[in-house]
Amino acid sequence: MSIVLTVEQREQAGSDSYNRFEYQVHWIVCHIIGKLQDDAECIVFCEFHDDMAEFSPNNQQYQFYQIKAKEDPSDWAIAEMSKREKKKSSGYKKSFLGFIFYNYLTFSTECSHCHFVSNNDFDKDVLSWQAVIEDGKKLQVEDIALYQKIKDRIKDEFINAMPSNFDSVFDTFIQNTFVHKSDLQLAAYENQTKGEFFNHLADKNIPINTANLIFQQLINDVRKKSKEKIKVPISMKRLVEKKGVDVAQIGRKIDGNIKNSGNYDEFHQYLLNQSLTKKDIRRIEAAKTLHDARWLDVNDVKYQEISSGEGKIPTDEECGICCCF
């Protein structure tokens, strides 16, 4: 069984700040939108071993993301990224870099890459590290002083429980950990995320009210799954239900059901030709809009089963709309 599915999470508390939590939620949604634009097949897990984890069904590997927003405009330095805070009980928490090293140490070949994302930029040392590994070169060869500086910081965190394979794991960590300055601004991330989503739907012929519903459902789904607590071991199926967003599934529902059946201009013209009253036309169009939105809601399985003929005929209360126009 996968190690990722059996190892207890370090913590399940999430961000200690509402604003940082919301920034994290919106960054995850932006990441999902980017994957939709790339037609990628992957599953995004919210607050699973890290702020976000991305699983690829093709190679059965995970990428882990730390998403850190701060109001202080200063650049991130190695010292700050490897700074340890005291626990409320006793001892010290691992640093941001220490937690990333932990992912490589614990999950071995199941962890392909780790990422550190922030609204702030990075200092010269961090950028030098990134420049070397992005070009496919070894930091140990190109800048031994910087390599040793980072290694010493990580080694200090594990001094009381030094793994026998520390050196080999560190080399994997140093060559496969990437930092990113996010385009999302702390003061405007909500509007930026919504804009990204509407840009993605721009050519899909979806009414604005339906697009708004889809967007809010996605935001709420990521919020809910970020707060959901789980126990391990856990099956992949159950993990997806509790903490996952299947990007390919969302893409198929948008493209296969809204784009092909969502031509509201033609639908409106069809209703006009049926000699219906304006009131009835409005009611039918409102019902269709609600249906399209609920069909896209990954949590509304009951409604989707009913709509596809796999369940019983719903009552008006279950459906949420009146079918007797």
Image: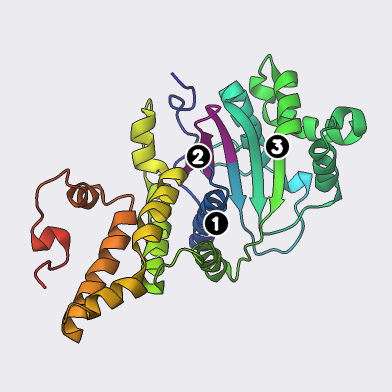
Task: Check disc 3 and give the amino acid type.
Answer: Thr
Residue 87 vs 307, above or below: the answer is above
- Residue at (47%, 33%) from the top-left corner? 9
Residue that sits furthest to the bottom in the current view: 278
- Residue at (84%, 43%) from the top-left corner? 131
Residue receiving disc 1: 30
Report crowding for label 1: few under 14, some 14 to 19, many 20 or more residues within 10 A (C-alpha). Answer: many
- Nearer to us: label 3 or label 1: 1
- Left or right of 13 on screen, residue 276: left
Disc marking residue 42: 2
> How far across and down, in percent of the image, does residue 66 sit?
60, 45
Residue 53 seen in this snapshot? yes
Q: Secondary structure at mark 3?
A: strand
Rendering quarter of residue 129: top right
Residue 219 vs 60, above or below: the answer is below
Asked whether residue 119 is drawn in magenta, I would say no
Task: Check disc 1 and give the amino acid type.
Answer: Cys
Asked whether residue 55 is drawn in magenta, I would say yes
Q: Which residues are magenta?
A: 43-64
* Between 132 and 252, the one nearer to me in the picture: 252
Task: Check disc 2 and give the amino acid type.
Answer: Cys
Compute the Cα span from label 1 to label 2: 14 Å
> How far across and down, in percent of the image, does residue 71 sit?
65, 64
- Nearer to us: label 3 or label 2: 2
Q: Which comes sooner in the sequence, label 3 or label 2?
A: 2
Residue receiving disc 3: 177
Q: Which comes sooner in the sequence, label 1 or label 2?
A: 1
